[in-house]
Image (spheres, coloured by chain):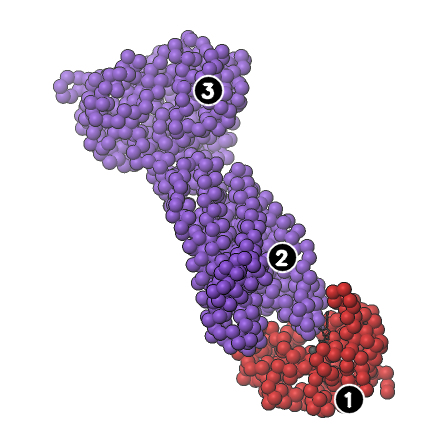
Amino acid sequence: MATQAEVLSARGIGKTVRSGISDLVILQDIDLEVISGEAVAIVGASGSGKSTLLAILAGLDTPTTGSVRLDGSDIFALDEDARAELRGRAVGFVFQSFQLLPALSALENVMLPLELAGRPDAQAQARAMLERVGLAERLGHYPKHLSGGEQQRVALARAFVVQPRVLMADEPTGSLDAASGEAVIQLMFELNAQAGTTLLMVTHDELLAKRCSRIVRLAGGKVVP
Amino acid sequence: MTSVRLALRMLMRDWRAGELRVLALALLIAVASVTSVSFFADRVRQGLNREAHQLLGGDLLLAGDQPWDPAVMAEIKRRGLAVAQSTNFISMAQSANGAGPKSLLTGAKAVTDSYPLRGKLRIAPRLNAPDAIAGSGPRPGTVWLDERLTSALSANPGDKVKLGDAEFTVAAVLTLEPDRGANFFNIAPRLMMNAADVPATGLIRTGSRVTYQVLVAGERRDVDGFEAWARTRLERGQRIENLDNARPEIRASLDRAQSFLGLTALLAAILAGVAIALATRRFVERHLDGCAVMRCLGATQARLMALYSMEFLMLGVTACAAGCLAGFAAQGLIANWLASIIQAELPQPTAIPALQGGLVGLTLLLGFALPPLLQLRNVPAVRVIRREAGAPRDGALLAYVLGFLTLVLLLLWQSGDLKLGMTVVGGFSAAVLLFIGIAWAALRAASSPASMRFFGAASPAVRYGLANLRRHSRSNAIQVASLALGLTAILLLTITRSDLIDAWRQAAPPDAPNRFLIGIQPEQLKPVQEFFRSAGMALPDVYPMVRGRLTAVNDRPVSEKDYPDERAKRLVEREFNLSYMDRLPAHNQIAAGRWFDPRNRAEGEASVEEGIAKTLGLKLGDLLTYNAAGEVFTARITSLRKLKWDSMKVNFFVVTPTWVLEKAPTSYITAFRLEAGSEPVLDRMVAAFPNLTVVDISAALKQAQGIIDQVILAVQFVFLFALGAGLLVLYSALIATEDERRRESAIMRAFGASAAQVSGSQRAEFLVMGAVAGLLATVAASAISTLLAQRVFQLELPVNYGLWVYGPLAGIALLSLNAWLSARKVLTASPAMTLREG
Ligand SMILES: Nc1ncnc2c1ncn2[C@@H]1O[C@H](COP(=O)(O)OP(=O)(O)O)[C@@H](O)[C@H]1O
Ligand SMILES: [Mg+2]
């Protein structure tokens, strides 16, 4: 595979935390390579370390050992602020609990990453993006007045509006009922395909994982075949 | 630049979401109360200095025994100053009507039409009729007689009076002469006439004792310039007076008002600080998730901090500006109320109060909002995945302490009253620490295993509620302390306020004396008392009075040249009214030193009024030498006294034990109340004791009471600010833990607890908290008010039993209401909704 197509690569990732008197090993010696345009599912039982791995790959959390290259940079050689900048430029996020800002309307939530990046056309872009996720009528609504599925669609719009290289999703359907979960997943794959984004999705749902191009299995903090 | 715009947008969004209202309101109230009070104090201070000049009738008084040189008059005109003149002489006045002529030595004062330049003359159409302001002095050919002269000569308006070669028509009863001053003694009854009539009397010839006075008024700078010019040209027998001290009884009232106002502003500012801290904490807790999300979206720590700091700064500056405006408007209202008592027009306010208010606002913002806000900087991005990952708390305590100290310094600067400031700040800090400690201990006790067994046996809900108390004991203690604080303020400002104000009104009660009786000879003491008894009037306190001149301090002869201060000069020039007594009168208070030692016969002791001691530079331990009609005696100052000038009782600057002054020529003085309609008693008294002088001080008394009433009104207005701040503290304390409680009840509900169980457990928890907060507030409010009354206002405060009922009840009621409201919110929403929002 060509190096410039390699978006993400992790080498020897380990994470140990102190809990009480003993050390708790959460992740152990994980290697992972993701190339541009791939859709990778990380699956495993609850507590197997999926979310922790995703957080490390995104530079949200720091590993005890190992290194991560994201979009050409060794992210743990950067300081936290430089990592934040890299995230803002290259990574989009979707979370199980949506994480919309409650004081902001749907439109404003989608505008936020553009505003932080100092883009002058934030409002027009955010509006267009919300139209694409089918929420053109709900621009001025606040998160608490939207259903779970609608909230997750706003979150998708917020993630895609900056045209990230990688979309990281942690259990995107975990808080949704089956029907709205399915709608959100379809939308996510659609947007992904249109933008050519690389997808990294954490899930414990085997069926959902099968729709990705590759599956990485995690058990007890290790990659298992 | 984009950051500024984004910060502004964030501000609008948070404002819209209602996250910032308490904060902004707290800032606004603090700034408004500080600025209005100091605007007001600033203007009143300046106004009082002008007011003081009423005692002169102008800003500057030139007095001499010869007519003033036309060059001086020309200079006054050249400098554009207002001028008035008066000629004063003693002469016999004769009434030429009725049953035989009566005559009396009078102090005649002939005034030009522009007199007085400061203050107003008041006249009445006849004795005891309501009086009114007179635009200028008597017209040519007419005279005004004061009340004493009117009754002594039986010359009522319309009658004729002879003075020297001229005859005049009495046109009015002179009831108030602004520059007559508070010195009622030694002044012959007044006859006021027009300056144009002086030659016709033929009374002014070479050798007659005449004082020629020139009054000058104008802008401060111009007057000062003229004074400097004139001083170099003074000749023998000429002097210049400029007065800086207002009438003591009015000053006492306004000083007290200033203390009240200062106290209120202090309280409002500190309470606002607490409300701001609480509101910002809540803001931060609600923004932790949002900050974590923004970190994920690429915002750096520095960026986040810059954005939120800018947001708060913009809010702060706006709120401070609004506060300054509100303060300015409020002081305008207050000044309007007071315009009638401070007769000189109040000068325009200066910019300093606005500066002070703005600084207080910014300090509050930096000191109380920044520390919690700084935590947002440390929010880990990983919180978006793992909710428990909170912000580490660091250095917040230091920032709070710094903020608090800065605020204290600012407020001390603003109030200019160290004692009051320290009482409030010290009391407040002690109360906060005590509150937190006691609340924590009380909550732990209420939720101890023993109490659980005792109360919890009844129902699992109560058990759960008590367990909650224990689990939250830290945050609950802070909440209870804040609640107690807010309640304390509100109790202080409602119940105690009216007690304090009643006590203040009592300082010049409606039955205060309104007449002085002067010149009672020792052998007349018994007959005078007998007279009062037979007239059915209460026997007034009678004080001996000795007139003496201060000749030496610590054996150094005093001379007026030693005193640069005009007031001091005049004081040493004249004879003092001294008195002797062995018991301290009830309306006097020892401010320093101790009262006379009855066994000390070796050396004379003296007790001196605080203010005059300061003017004359006298200290405890100084040896005073007096000459009373040739009798020389010495006394060492062993105490300084504070007098209640507004009580209108007989007061003396210097008193000694009886044995020291007993042998000096003594007359007696008393003050009594003459009810309206009993004036004939006065006539009988004057007839029975023709040598006595009755001085009517009812006008002065009315003025003092009017001032107290109006000032109280003004003070109450400012109280509203502090009350508002107190309510804000209460409100922010109540909602401080609302989010957490809401989540907990939702979890309980999700696990199948019934609505009744949830609200029952909350009720148990809140009941205990409310009772503790209410009790703490009651104790604090009564302690603080007692302290304030005694130390700061010198008032006696009766015990208020109602406080002990209302206080705790208010605490319980408040929290019960809160429990009910928050339970309703949670119980009507589905657990899933609440949990999701959480
Ligand atoms: N900072 C931490 N401290 C203690 N335990 C942690 C920490 N981070 C993760 N864990 C634990 O590691 C395990 C893996 O967590 P997580 O990555 O959230 O798993 P998953 O997403 O697969 O359910 C869990 O048992 C979690 O409690
Ligand atoms: Mg997980």
The shade of chain B is purple
Residue B317 % position (x, y): 57, 57
Q: Is residue B249 visible?
A: yes
CA distance for labels 3 and 2: 56 Å
The shade of chain A is red
Which residue occupies the foreground of this view, B102 or B235?
A: B102
Instruction: Judge depth for marks 1 and 2 and give the one in front.
Output: 1
Instruction: Judge depth for marks 3 and 2 and give the one in front.
Output: 3
Please give the chain letter of the residue carrying mark 1: A
Please give the chain letter of the residue carrying mark 2: B
Residue at position x 45%, y 43% from top? Answer: B785
Residue B699 % position (x, y): 31, 32
Quarter of the image with the N terminus of chain B is bottom right
Of pointers 3 and 2, the one earlier in the residue sequence: 2
Q: Which residue is mark 1?
A: A214
CB under 8 Å between discs 3 and 2: no
Q: Amino acid at mark 2?
A: Leu
